[in-house]
Amino acid sequence: MTSIGDGRGLGVVGQELARLAARLDTWEAVELARGLTHDYALILDEGGGQQLGGLFAVDAELTVLDETVRGREDIVAFFTRALSPDPSSRRHFITNNKVLEVTGDRVRLSSYFLYTAQGTTSSGIGWGRYDDTIDVSGQRAVFLRRRIEPCVRTDLARGWAGALDPSD
């Protein structure tokens, strides 16, 4: 991150440089956070529950619907359990990223997700929302908190015009 002080005592040009440096720091933090969400989607596409562990802080918190899991090891176990019974080929898309807050080395993002799945006998689709708090202070960004709010999970034969039940 860029650091040239707060700009006081530097005159008008120095103050402007300090303001621009602060904006650059914010932009870099946001891009690191967005990169983390991209890495998460790629790992999900590959079905790697174990590999997701490196994207979460040791003391991270994951909430899916009404279940909250704390700590990297338990988060890895959650994803391994959730992904293992589904051998389908899938693609995960993250859209409509909105920066809610940047405070120091923490970025809070809100986004939507959509996934498609191709199984041997059927194809599926689902979508929902993420609310993330991400630490960008280290060599790579990590999730401190991730809330997953699934809205729909269905197969294409059934469709999504009926009741929207994410637990189905």
Image: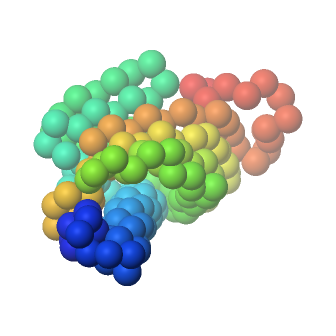
Above or below: residue 113 compared with residue 10? above
Q: Position of residue 21 (x, y in %)?
A: 34, 73
Total marks shown come to 0
Residue farthest along the bottom direction in this orientation:
13
Q: For residue 39, what is the image quadrant?
A: bottom left
Residue 161 visible in the displayed image? yes
Q: Quadrant of the N terminus?
A: bottom left
The residue under the point 61% across, 29% down is: 166
| Figure check: 149 above or below 134 | above
Please, which residue is most extreme toward the top here?
Answer: 66
Q: Residue at coordinates 39% horizontally, 75% vertically from top-left?
A: 12
Q: Nearer the viewer, residue 58 or 138?
A: 138
The chosen color scheme is rainbow
Residue at 38% across / 39% down in the picture?
A: 146
User: Does residue 44 appear to the left or right of 145 in the view shown?
Assistant: right
Q: Is residue 149 left or right of residue 135?
A: right
Report whether residue 50 is seen.
no
* Nearer-the-camera pick, 135 or 38: 135
Image location of residue 158, percent across then percent down: 79, 38
Residue 125 picture location, percent across and down: 67, 49
Image point (18%, 41%), residue name: 72
Q: Please state which of residues 35 and 65 is positioned toward the viewer in this rendering.
A: 35
Q: Quadrant of the C terminus?
A: top right
Residue 25 found in image quarter? bottom left
The image shows residue 14, relative to residue 127, as above or below, that is below
Measuring from the top left, give residue 123's x and y in whole percent.
67, 53
Which of 20/101 is in front? 20
